[in-house]
Image: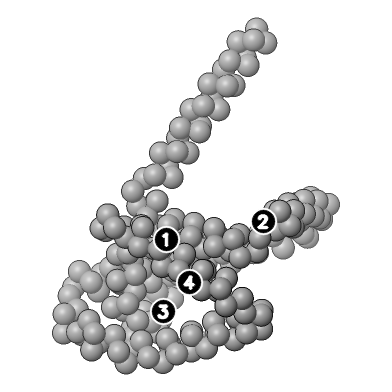
């Protein structure tokens, strides 16, 4: 068991080191984005919502086709991939890279690797469920996709995308400040109260 844990830890360290090497040119930008997403300043949350709202209002105004939108998005990614490693050191200054920043960059890369592993793990579990319990897999997929299709039919595509993007960009800050855990705890307490009241009525 210990040998398996050591192997998993070594593999995680190797994947993290590899990702750090690949994203080295994005280091300063990632650290800045990390500060914004974790709400290190009080005005970061409204700034995030403002930027996202501006981007989606622009998309709504221009009303591009799906092909044009995808092409522009991929073109923006290509430009960022080319320009960011060149411009970032000049803007932020590579000589200002400290041990603390390097440690935080390592933590970010490690979290990204863990998230990727978690996603792959869920994907493998889905196929395991398909092989071991095909009926449950079929029913789960049909109900889930039908629910998503119904929501997509009720809400405008652009508005739904805007809400999803805004939620995911605010999620790190919500976790960092304990807001999600606070409301989950409140919901659990309310559910427990309702269950206790139901038990008392049954008695």
Q: Name the quadrant containing residue 109.
A: bottom left
- Give the left or right position of residue 131, taking residue 156 as reference: right
Tag 1 or tag 2, which sits nearer the N-term? 1
- The residue that mark 3 highlights is 19
Tag 4 or tag 1, which sits nearer the N-term? 1
Q: Secondary structure at mark 2?
A: loop
Circles 2 and 1: CB distance less than 8 Å? no
Closest to the camera, between mark 4 and mark 3, is 4
Q: CA distance from mark 2 to mark 1?
A: 20 Å
- The residue that mark 2 highlights is 155
Closest to the camera, between mark 2 and mark 3, is 2
Q: CA distance from mark 2 to mark 3?
A: 38 Å
- Which x, y percent locates residue 195? 59, 21
Q: CA distance from mark 4 to mark 3?
A: 29 Å
Tag 3 or tag 1, which sits nearer the N-term? 3
The mark found on residue 55 in the picture is 4
Q: Secondary structure at mark 1?
A: helix
Can residue 85 be seen by looking at this rendering?
Answer: yes
Q: Who is closer to the viewer here, 88 or 152?
A: 152
Q: Name the quadrant containing residue 41.
A: bottom left
- The residue that mark 1 highlights is 49
Q: Secondary structure at mark 4?
A: helix
Badge 2 local density, few (<14 within 10 Å), some, or many (20+)?
few
Q: What residue is shown at x 54% (from left), y 62% (from top)?
A: 162
């Amino acid at each position: 068991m210990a040998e398996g844990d050591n192997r998993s830890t070594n593999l995680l360290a190797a994947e993290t080191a590899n990702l750090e090497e690949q994203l080295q040119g994005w280091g300063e930008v990632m650290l800045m984005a990390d500060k914004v997403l974790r709400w290190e300043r009080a005005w970061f949350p409204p700034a995030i919502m403002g930027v996202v709202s501006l981007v989606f209002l622009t998309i709504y105004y221009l009303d591009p086709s799906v092909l044009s939108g995808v092409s522009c998005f991929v073109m923006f990614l290509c430009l960022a991939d080319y320009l960011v490693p060149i411009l970032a050191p000049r803007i932020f200054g590579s000589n200002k890279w400290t041990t603390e920043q390097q440690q935080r960059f390592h933590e970010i890369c490690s979290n990204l690797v863990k998230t990727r592993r978690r996603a792959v793990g869920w994907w493998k579990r889905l196929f395991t469920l398909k092989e071991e319990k095909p009926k449950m897999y079929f029913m789960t997929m049909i109900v889930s996709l039908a629910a998503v299709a119904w929501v997509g039919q009720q809400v405008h595509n652009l508005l739904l995308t805007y809400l999803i993007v805004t939620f995911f960009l605010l999620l790190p800050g919500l976790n960092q400040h304990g807001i999600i855990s606070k409301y989950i705890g409140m919901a659990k307490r309310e559910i427990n109260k309702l269950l206790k009241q139901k038990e008392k009525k049954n008695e």
